[in-house]
Amino acid sequence: MPGITYFDLRHVTGQITHIDIDNGVFESAGTTFFNKAVLRVISNAGWGILQIDNYQPCTGKKFDDLLQNACTLSAITQEQVCLADVPRGVLSVPAMKEDPRSVSIEEKSAILAEIEKGAIHPSVVNRRANYIERVEQVEFSDSSGNEYAYEMCRSGFNVMAVASQNGNTQMGYEREHSIHGFNLRHHQDLGKKAAGIAVDLLGAKAARGGKMKAILDPELAGVFAHEAVGHASEGDLIQEGNSVLKGKTGLKIGNDLLTIVDDPGIHEFGFDPVDSEGVAVRRTEIIKNGIVNAFLHNRESLAAVGNGVAGHARGMPGEPPLVRMSNTFIEAGDSTDDEIFEECKNGIFLKGSRGGQVDPGRGVFQFNAEYGYLVKDGECTGMVRDVSISGDILTTLHNIALCGKNRKMSPGYCGKGGQSVPVSDGAPTILLCDAVVGGSGMD
Amino acid sequence: MRWWVAVEWIDQLIQKGLKSVDEVEVFYVEGRSISADLKQKKINLASASEDCGLGIRTIHKGRIGSSSTNDPLKWGECLDAAIASGHLATPLPWDGLPEVQEVSHTPLTFDPLMKVDPASALTLLEQMLAGSEEHAAEVTSGSAGLSSATVTLANSRGVHYTDSHTGVSLSLEAIDGQSTGYEFDHSSFINKVDPFHVGERATFFAHQSAGGKEIPTGNYEILLSPLAYAELLGGVFIPALNGRNVHAGRSKFAQSLGEPVADQRISMYDDPFLPGASGSVSWDAEGMPTHRIDFIQDGVLKAFAYDLKTAYRYGKVSTASAVRGGYGGSPGIGHHNFVVDGERSSVADEHVVYVHSVVGAHTANPMSGEFSVELSNAFWMDEGEFQEPIRSAMLSGNVFSLHNEIIGISKESRSIGSLILPSVKINKQRIIGK
């Protein structure tokens, strides 16, 4: 079609099965279906994009009409979009140990109910457990003749316990999500664990704010990497001028021992066999030995900015892909836990994550732990609750003094531009000096 | 009229469903939208979507089932899935879907002047960019979107209501060195948004926040902008007014009905008939006629929000607070236009720390209300004038208890999504400097 220099179509069909148990009551359970596509065209200058509900694959005049509609939209664009040449290839999706679709929803409900019952405790006033299973069939084709298709299944569960005593209300929360198949079995202990944390938090103190040494467990240190470095290295933000890492390639912003990676190809929750633009995925070392090394890119931002690796475009079904993280982690170091606690001596040990946020242009981030313990003379003492840490991208990474030996990844979801995609974050246990800790405690 | 086409299969669906279950409810939405995005000052993409979605709820002997699809031709399969899902649900007390009641059918959030086309998006972006020229900061990104949708709700007791909505939304981000600014606006009515002002404020906050100074750790009188207040209120305080959370033990307010929970100058209510407000609606997502709900009057907790399911379960009355986030799933408890109101005053006449927004509000503890967030676009303010910017600091506190420390609410209010909020001045809040 005249004027069109590129188009691609990503069509995703699938089904979502969920179960929701609230204090022993099956609130809802069942399956829903979806069918969404996104057609992107470059003509005139920039992108014309059609988001299509209930797409029926078509060719000939019908498809040409869709292309024409997208062209009409792009008539108002002004920026000349160029796409970088990129490597192609599709990884195979790892086989599932047990396909969740082979397990009846009645059996899933019964196992989830056991997990939820595990949270029964005299001080627990509410228990809630959810199961979610999402199967997607993805088909991609573009005007250069690239085509791929794959199927992915992600499933997992959350269990929450709320404990209450004399007007003090606290919660404990556990979750497991996987790309490796049905993972509800053998997790009855997690309901009990969530209840235990909620009950223990009833006796925890609010943390006192200020600067201190903080030990971050692998889950929280992973969120730290995601917020402190991951977002600011996204090529679209660099291109817009909305990241403090713009123009900082080669600058040392952390210790020699610090290497931070995003790798969509590893078999963790953020796994992508190929990205949403049909680009082969690759390990990208964002920070290498403390130096800003490579940005995460899509084809457009790689062409505009350079200094990095494409293959990081990800979109929800029916949504235009954005530059996103996938599996983001701090590489393991060589310190033992004993050495980390000894070096910390007096400070705070923070565990779990309630998420975080970053203003990449300003270079300021914040993230929150589920709970923690005060560290005195290298030993964990009293429990603390509601602890946040904030920091500055260009300076805080220098304060990572030690990295432990064992890296662990945790699954989650990350939001950007109204889209939520599955990710995992991870790290070894780390020691952060001069951490700015927020808490409302006064002693 | 297009929805007459819809009627036919909706009636067929209901009749088919009634062969297997006591009651059937159908929610159907059709809509279209256009948006255009800026990369710096140039339009990088324009997109359009045509959406449709069908949500079905079935009730049989107290067992509620649901399913959804975005292919309305597959309503038969969707109905079967809803009925199957009902088999798994625990039976709960249920006294029936609403019958036809007297509700206004005049759309409250439909603007016939709204043109959902690329040219309108282009005009809005150009006006925002013109506004952004007022201050020395660079535009990094921006967006303008327009939408229209028709919603149909039908049930097996004869309800068949249709409503139309329109919407416009704008946002712009800017940067000056390492100082960022962000502004947005939204409405159901095209003439109620001010794109020039959005552009002007985005570059204002970016430029005005540059060169900020540190603030020592201590307790300060703060003025939360409607945006910062919304970020803290939305995830913690409002869910605690949800009847489901109250009865399930997930609300701080579970034992507080009739008790003071905020300063006596504060009232909070849901007004579904507020003229021009984007959540205004005559019937809720289950077809119950809406009305005003006074949650908090002069600081005293007076009411919680209920949908039918929760009301039947706990012997209460629905407050017509059922809302849907989309066509998927079942309706849940929410609000239409949530207003914080009370005695207004000049809140900016003294020396205060003005907080425009915060980073990380969603990490607040939703049960206890504890939070510690990073300040964003914070300034010293005197006599309502922005003074020296504050570079970086954390604000720590408790969303519930800070309502007892409110010492003033501003004369002006602003819509933030479905919240209509003033600026609030709060005594003795903990700021942690760096």
Image: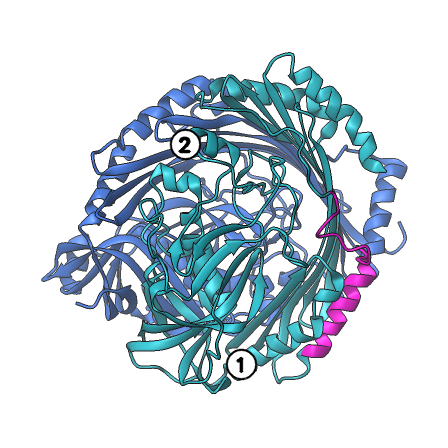
Chain colours: A blue, B cyan
Look at 66% across and 20% down and name the residue there.
Answer: B77
Q: Nearer the viewer, residue A66 or B156?
A: B156
Judge whether B16 appears above or below B39 on screen: above
* Residue B119 falls within the magenta-colored stretch: yes
Which image quadrant is residue B314 in?
A: top left
Residue where numbered disc 2 is placed: B314
- Please tell me whether residue A198 belongs to the stretch shown in magenta: no
Which residue type does callout 2 highlight?
Tyr
Residue A17, position in %: x, y? 52, 28
In this rendering, the label closer to the viewer, 1 or 2: 2
Where residue A342 sits in the image (x, y, percent)?
13, 61
Q: Amino acid at mark 1?
A: Gly
Q: Is residue A415 visible?
A: yes
How crowded pointer 1 is (Cα within 10 Å; few <14, some 14-19, many 20+) is rated as some
Q: Would you say residue A53 is visible in this rendering?
A: no
Q: Earlier in the sequence, mark 1 or mark 2?
A: 1
The image quadrant that residue B56 belongs to is top right
- Label 2 marks a residue whose chain is B
Q: Foreground residue, B110 or A254? A: B110
Which numbered circle lies on residue B177?
1
Quadrant in which the C terminus of chain A is drawn:
bottom left
Q: Which residues are magenta?
A: B105-131
